Amino acid sequence: SYLPWFEVFYKLLNTLADYLSKGQIFIQNYALLCLGFVHKIPMKRTKVSYGNRNLTELIVAVDVGNLLQLYASMLFERRILIFASKLSTLTSCAHALSAVLYPMYWQHIFIPVLPPHLLDYCCAPMPYLIGVHTSLTERVKSRGLEEVVMLNVDTNTLETPFDDLKRIPSDVMSGLKVCLKRQAVSPGCGVSRAFLKAQALLFGGYRDALQNDKVCEIYFCEELFLDHKSASMKQFLQSAIHLQFFKQFIDGRLDILNKGNGQDDLFEEEITKCETTAGVYLDVFRMSQYRLFIYLLQIPSHLKIVICGLQAQSDTLIKSLHVFAYAVK
């Protein structure tokens, strides 16, 4: 969950475990302990952080090189197996890997700890992210699995038949590598921020591909999304647009916008921050169009049609302003 419940229950269970180990747990103490961990339900559209503790445990257990390989495998929706001898570590690493895709969600089989009687799931032909206790390693490998990415957390070793890392724009991965190496020394919320920035650099251009039809319904244009991209970025995005997590993300964003709600979360903030850092003057106009979409969905239908008509007539002017912005730059 991207809500804070994971952290709350983790702290509560750890505290209970300490009391149990010392023989100090009583019903009265348990009730008082629960009261001490009361957490207010976040208001609608409240911005919350995600997966920091799990990501911290992952970056402590796995070196940066392997972590980048795993991130690339997640971006291409591979079949991924994680092995560890400690169940808490196994759970944390599985949840952490699913969190690196934020604001996207892993859309396929997800089993943080696979029970022995379900080992046949490892032979599934579709993408999966599965955690397996190391005591079952030989039983899993005896199934002759092909095209599966395997990480052993205990030994920090990764086996993969793919070269996914080279298929992602090198500038994005180089920046992520630098950030993760810095965080590996002193892990914290910077780990999640590093992946969030990478996601914004890879997929933030989706806002440029939002268009509105004659009745001001917003839709996503794949051609615009791929337009004006570097060769490496375009090649990556051509694969990404067919992946389930990206399709779900776009459908979710369009649903929110077409219901008249603006999307204002950590991801959108990071996109704007990346654009500002890069000094992209053209984004002033792109942001204006994005905000216009949000505004149009909050006004009566008969006014939408009028404004959309005016917007269409202004296309030539906006294109001229775009050319001027590049000339100034």
Image (cartoon, rainbow, N blue to C red):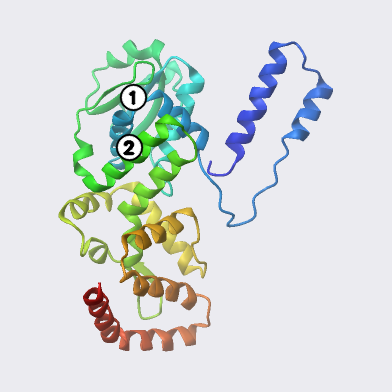
Q: Which kind of residue does numbered mark 2 sit on?
A: Tyr
Quadrant in the picture for the C terminus: bottom left
Residue 79 horizontal/vertical position (percent)? 30, 31
**Residue at point 43% right, 60% down?**
253
Which residue of the protein is positioned furthest toward the right in this rendering? 28
> Residue 218 location in percent, x, y?
39, 70
Name the residue: 39% across, 70% down. Answer: 287
Query: Looking at the image, is 136 positioned above or below residue 328?
Result: above
Q: What x and y, as percent, mark residue 115?
A: 46, 19
- According to the picture, the residue beneath numbered tag 2 turns out to be 71
* Closer mark to the observer between disc 2 and disc 1: 2
Decide which of 181, 83 is in the foreground and name it: 181
- Whether residues under marks 2 and 1 lie with C-beta atoms below 8 angstroms apart, the answer is no
Write the residue at 37% across / 62% down. 276
Residue 174 numbered mark, or none: none
Compared to residue 269, the image places residue 131 above or below, namely above
Figure quadrant of residue 283? bottom left
> Looking at the image, is 117 positioned above or below residue 239?
above
Label 2 and label 1: CA atoms lie apart by: 20 Å
The amino acid on which the numbered mark 1 sits, given as a three-letter code, is Cys
In the displayed structure, would residue 328 be above or below residue 227? below
- Residue 19 as seen in the image, left or right of residue 245: right
Q: What element carries label 2?
A: helix
Tell me the quarter of the picture where residue 154 sits: top left
Q: Which of marks 2 and 1 is nearer the N terminus?
A: 2
Query: Which of 57 and 77 lies nearest the eye of the viewer?
Result: 57
**As rendered, which of 205 and 302 lies closer to the eye?**
205
The residue at which mark 1 appears reads as 122
| Image location (x, y in percent) of residue 317 | 28, 86
Left or right, 230 with respect to 220, comes to left
